[in-house]
Image (cartoon, grey):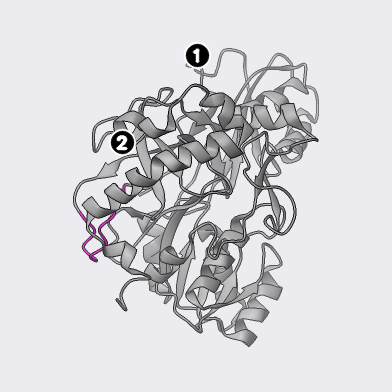
C-alpha cells in the first residue's frame, strides 16, 4: 500500500458504493435531527427510504444562495443558518468565512476536510516540510491543506499570501520539500526567484488549488523542476477530488456522494455529460445533503491507471451560473451590478476575464451615457473596493455590448 494513502482508495467499487448507500439513510436522519435547516428542507422525508442514488436524486438541491440566505436570516443568533450540527466550543475549533460572507464551522476530526489523499497522490510524504501559501486570513483554504499535510505526517510552514521576498527567503533558508497554494502565486515565486537569484530548488513538488492549472502552466512548472498537481475543493465541503500521476482527470475522495446534474435542476445527467457537481457529504459536523457547488464538471468512464478505483471527474469546467473565480477569488454578477450602480453615467456593464497560464486579466466593459473626466479611474477604484481585485476599465458607447444577458464573460484560454 506504499503507493496509496490508505486501502479505501483501492477497494472494490461495488463495496464502496454499498457502504456509501448504507451510510446515506443515517446521514439524512442525522441532518434532519441535528441541523435545523435540513429539518425544514427535508421535512416529511423518510430517511430510511433514502438508500440509493435514485432515492437521493428525489431530494431537493441546496445551493449556495439558499445557504447564504438562511445564514443571513438567522444572524447573529446562528451564523450558520441552521446547517451546522455542532456548536461553538471544543468541537468547533474555528469558524471560517468565505465570500458572501458565508460562515463555515471547523471540526475536530483528523484530516477533517479530507486533503491527505490528494497530498499523498502528489508525492507528499512523512517528514516533508511543506510551504503553505494558501491564505490563513478568514477563509478555510490554508487550514484544509494544513490538516491534510499533518495527516500525512508533514511539517507545515504557514506562509500565507503576499510578501514574496520574505517567502523566498524562508524557502531558501528552510529548504521545504513541497508547495501548497494557488498556481499563480507559485509562478510568481518561481519567476521572482530566478530574477533575484534565490535558490528554491529544494521545493520540487506541489499541490495547487483555488484556480485552474492548465497543461501549459503545469509543463512550465516541470521545466523549472516542479512536479505540480491540482486539487478541487470548496470551503463548504472540503476536498472533493484530486489529480494523480496518471494526469487523467481528478479522482473523487472517499466519504462523499457526488452527482452531476443538469444546471438549475436536480436531475442527474448521463455519464460524460457536463453538468453541475452536487455533493452529499458524510461529515457529521456539517451534514450537507445534495449541496450544489455551482461548478460544472463531468464524469470520466473507467478507472485511474494508478489503481485508484473511485470515480473520476474531468475537473473544473466552469460555473453553472456566471460567478467566476479570478485569481483565486469568486466574483459574482451582483458585484458587477454594485459597481455599475455607483455611477449614474453607466448604462450597462460586462466583466470580461481573459488571459492564460494563470495570468488572469479582468476588464470591466462599460457603456456610458457621458464620460466625465476621471470616470474610468473612479470605476477602477470601485472594482478594487467591491471585488478586492484590480481590473482595467474600457468605456464604450451605448449599444456596444451584446444583448445576451451576460454580466461576466470568461474568455480565458485553458490550453
On screen, residue 415 above or below 204: above
For disc 2, the neighbor class at 10 Å (few under 14, some 14 to 19, many from 20) is some
Q: Main secondary structure of the magenta part?
A: loop
Disc nearest the viewer among 2 and 1: 2
Depth check, front residue: 15 or 186: 15
Q: Is residue 304 magenta?
A: yes
Residue for point 44% across, 79% down: 125
Residue for point 31% across, 40% down: 298
Give residue 214's quadrant in the image.
Answer: bottom left
Q: Which quarter of the figure is the N terminus placed in?
A: bottom left
Residue for point 70% across, 38% down: 101
Q: Is residue 284 visible?
A: yes
The residue indicated by pointer 2 is: 52
Q: Position of residue 173 (x, y in %)?
A: 64, 87
Depth check, front residue: 164 or 64: 64
Q: CA distance from mark 2 to mark 1?
A: 44 Å
Q: Is residue 246 magenta?
A: no
Check residue 108 in the rendering and tell me which mark sits there, or answer none: none
Depth check, front residue: 233 or 236: 236
Q: Position of residue 325 (x, y in %)?
A: 54, 42
Q: Is residue 412 left or right of residue 313?
A: right
**Circle 1: element type:** loop
- The region drawn magenta spans 303-313
On screen, residue 199 above or below 93: below
On screen, residue 251 above or below 38: below
Give residue 79's quadrant in the image.
Answer: top right
Sequence-wise first label, 2 or 1: 2
Q: Position of residue 295 (x, y in %)?
A: 45, 38
Q: Is residue 382 left or right of residue 299?
A: right
Q: Is residue 411 visible?
A: no
The residue indicated by pointer 1 is: 403
For disc 1, the neighbor class at 10 Å (few under 14, some 14 to 19, many from 20) is few
Amino acid at each position: 500500500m506504499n503507493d496509496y494513502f490508505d486501502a479505501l482508495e483501492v477497494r472494490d467499487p461495488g463495496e464502496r458504493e454499498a457502504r456509501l448507500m448504507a451510510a446515506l439513510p443515517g446521514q439524512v436522519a442525522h441532518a434532519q435531527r441535528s441541523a435545523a435547516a435540513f429539518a425544514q428542507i427535508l421535512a416529511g422525508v423518510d430517511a430510511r427510504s433514502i438508500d440509493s442514488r435514485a432515492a437521493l436524486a428525489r431530494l431537493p438541491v441546496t445551493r449556495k444562495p439558499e445557504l447564504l440566505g438562511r445564514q443571513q436570516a438567522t444572524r447573529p443568533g446562528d451564523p450558520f443558518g441552521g446547517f451546522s450540527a455542532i456548536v461553538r466550543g471544543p468541537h468547533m475549533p474555528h469558524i471560517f468565512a468565505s465570500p458572501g460572507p458565508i460562515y463555515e464551522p471547523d471540526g475536530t476530526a483528523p484530516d477533517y476536510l479530507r486533503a491527505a489523499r490528494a497530498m499523498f497522490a502528489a508525492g507528499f510524504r512523512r517528514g516533508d516540510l511543506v510551504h503553505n501559501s494558501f491564505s490563513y486570513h478568514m477563509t478555510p483554504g490554508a487550514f484544509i491543506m494544513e490538516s491534510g499535510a499533518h495527516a500525512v505526517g508533514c511539517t507545515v510552514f504557514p506562509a500565507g499570501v503576499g510578501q514574496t521576498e520574505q517567502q523566498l527567503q524562508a524557502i531558501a533558508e528552510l529548504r521545504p520539500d513541497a508547495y501548497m497554494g494557488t498556481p499563480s502565486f507559485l509562478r510568481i515565486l518561481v519567476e521572482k526567484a530566478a530574477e533575484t537569484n534565490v535558490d528554491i530548488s529544494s521545493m520540487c513538488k506541489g499541490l495547487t488549488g483555488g484556480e485552474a492549472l492548465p497543461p501549459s502552466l503545469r509543463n512550465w512548472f516541470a521545466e523549472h523542476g516542479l512536479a505540480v498537481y491540482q486539487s478541487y475543493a470548496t470551503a463548504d465541503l472540503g476536498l472533493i477530488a484530486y489529480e494523480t500521476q496518471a494526469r487523467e482527470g481528478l479522482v473523487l475522495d472517499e466519504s462523499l456522494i457526488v452527482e452531476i446534474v443538469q444546471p438549475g435542476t436536480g436531475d442527474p445527467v448521463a455519464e460524460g455529460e457536463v453538468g453541475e457537481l452536487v455533493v452529499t457529504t458524510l461529515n457529521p459536523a456539517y451534514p450537507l445533503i445534495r449541496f450544489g457547488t455551482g461548478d460544472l464538471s463531468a464524469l470520466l468512464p473507467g478507472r485511474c491507471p494508478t489503481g485508484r478505483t473511485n470515480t473520476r471527474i474531468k475537473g473544473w469546467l466552469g460555473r453553472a451560473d456566471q460567478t467566476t473565480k479570478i485569481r483565486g477569488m469568486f466574483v459574482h454578477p451582483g458585484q458587477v451590478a454594485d459597481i455599475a450602480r455607483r455611477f449614474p453615467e453607466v448604462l450597462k456593464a460586462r466583466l470580461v476575464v481573459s488571459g492564460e497560464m494563470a495570468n488572469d486579466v479582468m476588464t470591466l466593459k462599460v457603456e456610458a451615457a457621458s464620460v466625465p473626466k476621471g470616470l474610468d479611474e473612479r470605476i477602477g477604484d470601485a472594482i478594487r473596493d467591491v471585488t478586492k481585485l484590480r481590473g482595467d476599465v474600457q468605456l464604450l458607447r451605448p449599444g456596444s455590448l451584446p444583448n445576451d444577458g451576460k454580466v461576466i464573460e470568461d474568455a480565458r484560454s485553458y490550453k
